[in-house]
Image: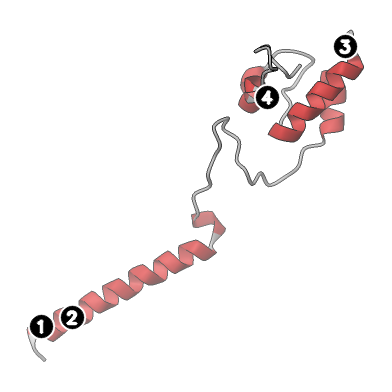
């Protein structure tokens, strides 16, 4: 066997193994890179948060609980996240903290 045919066989095997690994990465979810939106939330979050319960806890001390629950529910549906406690802690949920009203004020309680 000539040197050229040995190099050709090795190059073919290398190319085949790279193609095989690429195909395996497409099928295996642990090897895929997941995209993240601007607010830092993954579009395919593995679980759906209980927005009703989370917002009830968040708004329990509010002077306007119905308004608070409505705004919190909208934010929770969009972000799938509600910060813990009755106020503050917005740094724990960047999407929730980034939402604003048309007037530029924070939307989420």
Label 2's element?
helix
Where on the picture, by quarter, is residue 77?
top right
* Tag 2–tag 1 contact (CB < 8 Å): yes
Q: Which sits earlier in the primary sequence, circle 2 or circle 3?
A: 2
Q: Residue furthest front?
A: 102
Label 4's element?
helix
Quarter of the image with the N terminus is bottom left
Question: Picture coordinates of residue 99 (x, y %)?
Answer: 66, 22
**What separation in Å lies between label 3 and label 4 (alpha carbons)?**
19 Å
* Tag 3–tag 4 contact (CB < 8 Å): no
Frontmost of labels 4 and 2 is 4
Q: Which residue is mark 3?
A: 61
Residue 67 in the figure: left or right of residue 48: right
Q: Which residue is mark 1?
A: 4
Q: Which residue is mark 4?
A: 96
Instruction: Note whether residue 9 is visible.
Output: yes
Q: Which sits earlier in the primary sequence, circle 4 or circle 1?
A: 1
Which residue is at 56% across, 37% downward? 37
Residue 68 in the figure: left or right of residue 26: right
Q: Which sits earlier in the primary sequence, circle 4 or circle 2?
A: 2
Question: Picture coordinates of residue 88 (x, y %)?
Answer: 70, 13
Label 1's element?
helix
**What separation in Å lies between label 1 and label 3 (alpha carbons)?**
79 Å
Residue 46 vertical position relative to residue 52 in the rendered view, above or below: below
Q: Which residue is mark 2?
A: 8
């Amino acid at each position: 066997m000539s040197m050229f045919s040995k190099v050709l066989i090795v190059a073919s095997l290398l190319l085949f193994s790279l193609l095989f690994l690429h195909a395996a990465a497409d099928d295996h979810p642990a090897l895929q890179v997941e995209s993240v939106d601007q607010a830092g939330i993954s579009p395919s979050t593995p679980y759906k948060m209980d927005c009703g319960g989370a917002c009830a806890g968040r708004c329990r001390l509010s002077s306007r609980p119905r308004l608070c629950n409505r705004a919190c529910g909208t934010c929770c549906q969009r972000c799938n996240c509600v910060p813990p406690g009755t106020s503050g802690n917005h740094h724990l949920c960047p999407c929730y903290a980034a939402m604003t009203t048309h007037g530029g004020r924070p939307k989420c309680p």
